[in-house]
Image (cartoon, grey):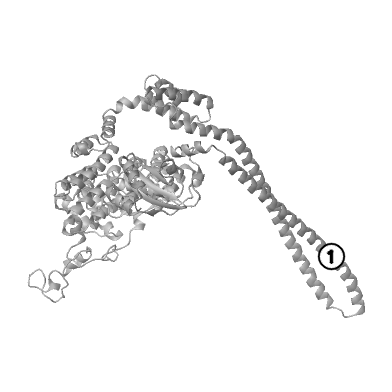
Amino acid sequence: MTDEALLGLLRNTDRSIKAVSEIAPGFAQIPQQDLTRLMLKLIDEGEDKALGIFLNVIAYQRMSFDTRVLCQSLKVVDKTDDFIYPFREQDEKAIEPLLELAQAKDISGQRNVLAALLAVEFSVKYGAMGREVKKVLTKMTNSLIMPEAMLLIRSALAFLEDEESRNVFMPAFLEKDIHEELPESKGPSYIGQSHTVRRPVPKISRNAPCHCGSGKKHKKCCLEKDQELFHDASPYAGLTMSQVMSSPDLVDDTLVIDNMRAYQLKKLNHQKLKNKQLLAAYQKASAFGLYETGYRMLLELKGRPEQEDLAVLHLHDLLHAALDDGDLELSKIIEGQIPQDELEDEEGKKFHMFLLENKDLFMTMEKHCQGCLTNQDDFLRFNPVDMAYCFEKLFPALTIIFTRSAIIEHRTSPLDNRFLLDILRNARTDLDLEPLDDPIENYHEWSMDKLEQGFDLEAKDREIHELKQKIYEGRRCALEQDRELREKERELQTLSKKLEKEDRLKDTINLEQGQSHAQTGEQADVSHLKRRIERMKMEVREQQNERRRLSKLLEAKRAERIKTDEKLPHQGREKAVDEGHAGAARETDFNVKKVVIPVYTDQFRNSCEQISTGIVAKALRAIAGFAAHDQDVLRQSKRLERFSSVYRVRIGLYHRLLIRYEKEELKVLDLIHRQDLEKWIRHYSRGPDH
């Protein structure tokens, strides 16, 4: 059977176990290499629905398939369940391509997570590549912003690391069996499942002449074909969704571009797209990491009337992205399209290209740094302190960089750090810099103050802990006595009821006398119980008083510790915060510990429309971290010297986020290029309306 015949068979098969079971035996007779070629053709041509049926056939026949080709199908297949079913028959060889797929840029984040979770299940099932899988998952936790996806990845890490934690929620994809999952027969088809639709063909009565001009009645001619078109209806009158996706220029709308996947963007005809659609397509391609496709789109936009400046602006962003991706050839091509006098940070870009061209020159340095970080046997005695001494006479700038690193790493070694500061000051003198004006000086002073006070603080912590334990024991004893008191009260009530009942049984004088003796004994028991209850109540009150006393003492100790922290030199603390050092950034810089809801200015919103989506996404994450007082974000924050309530936050290499935090109010002012910071400060100092 030819490829075209097989394609027709797949296109005409519905997604049900009955239909799949009818065609599956025929595919089982086809050689493996022909099946692989057919799948690659479906992927290349974007046959998403037919590809899903093909994956169902593979799973139904329980075939072992080329795993790398199987992984590529996730970029095109319409329903991700169809992608999962065939992996039931794969082995540990699937882990590596799944990890590559989990890091691929040309698929959505949800599909990245799916590939990662499958890799985790294979790793646990076969006990293979656990370290590599953990690396990929850890990187994903630093890049995902979807809460649901983050929860799945963290659960997968626990599932991977600890056998006792494997009762956490995990989807168990490898247990999915297509024989049980697919519906028995084709389900009902719905029109416009995710969008409001318009009629793709005119409304015609069944008995009216057909619109095709054949002269036949509509029901005898095109009715059946028109009904099929209704199931592919789009939000645009007279057009099906397939027509709109293949030719977006038929409508004046960018929404259709926003809903495209990577393989669809690659097939677009750039010349036919309208200006807004072309820009939207570039931004979507850039988000998917399709930088060559995005470059061709910007080149097309640059050649259109009055669009050159806008295209050049985005070429700057694309150049940054291509350099970060390590694509040297494309970076040079993009640089050639930007006027020389408009290149931003030209020296920085040239150095980045130099690094890409001369990676081997830095491999020895990279090896030494790895040894410092991992404590490998060959470098057990080689650390940043030694590197600082090695650079001392040769490279003063590198000496300063490694000396700073060594001081931070050995912050509890005063003697070593004093020698290192001397080296740093000599290097600054060699570079004609002020010897004592290095930011690490303030950090060193602050860390020494903290080290001296650390012993007192540890003693206070132990005392506070002991007080907490006493309060806990007192509370526990009070609860036990209170419980015992309630039990005695119940016994007293029981005896009282018994006495009342016996009082009514006075039939004879003898009985009355006997009862009198019994009552006297029972009254004595009651009196004894009452006295015991009173004593227990007094003990409970004493325990409560003791608990209140300990609570007051605990509060006093906490206040004393806060006062101790506040005794740090004010000047050193402010400088350390201004220089952005993590150790010097104190929690008391903020008045409250609750999350502050940010307010976005119009200027910030306008800036976001002009800056690449990757930078904007990083800025939004930084705003959320700043609002929640996240220490990682605060390390990247620095208060502006001219404005005590305005902070700048580092976003990547070239952008800065401006935030005003004052009186429990957080206002996001602007997102700018770092070269524009001084100009922004001058403009802000004139009192603009933010």
The quadrant where residue 389 appears: top left
Q: Closer to the camera, 180 or 541?
A: 541
Q: Nearer the viewer, residue 603 or 236?
A: 603
Mark 1 lies on residue:
527
Q: How many marks?
A: 1
| Vertical side of 362 occupied by 514: above or below | below
For the question of whether residue 122 can be seen, the reply is no
Instruction: Give the percent coordinates (x, y) of residue 342.
Output: 22, 39
Q: Please, what is the three-letter code of the amino acid marked with disc 1?
A: Ser
> Would residue 261 appear left or right of 549 to someone viewing this image?
left
**Residue 124 lies in quadrant:** top left
Q: Position of residue 285 (x, y in %)?
A: 24, 47
Where residue 219 appears, as percent x and y from the top left, is 15, 73
Residue situated in front as seen by the camera: 463 or 493 = 463
* Above or below, 102 relative to 504: above
In the picture provided, is 591 more to the left or to the right than 98? right
Q: Residues within 10 Å of mark 1 (few under 14, many from 20)?
A: few
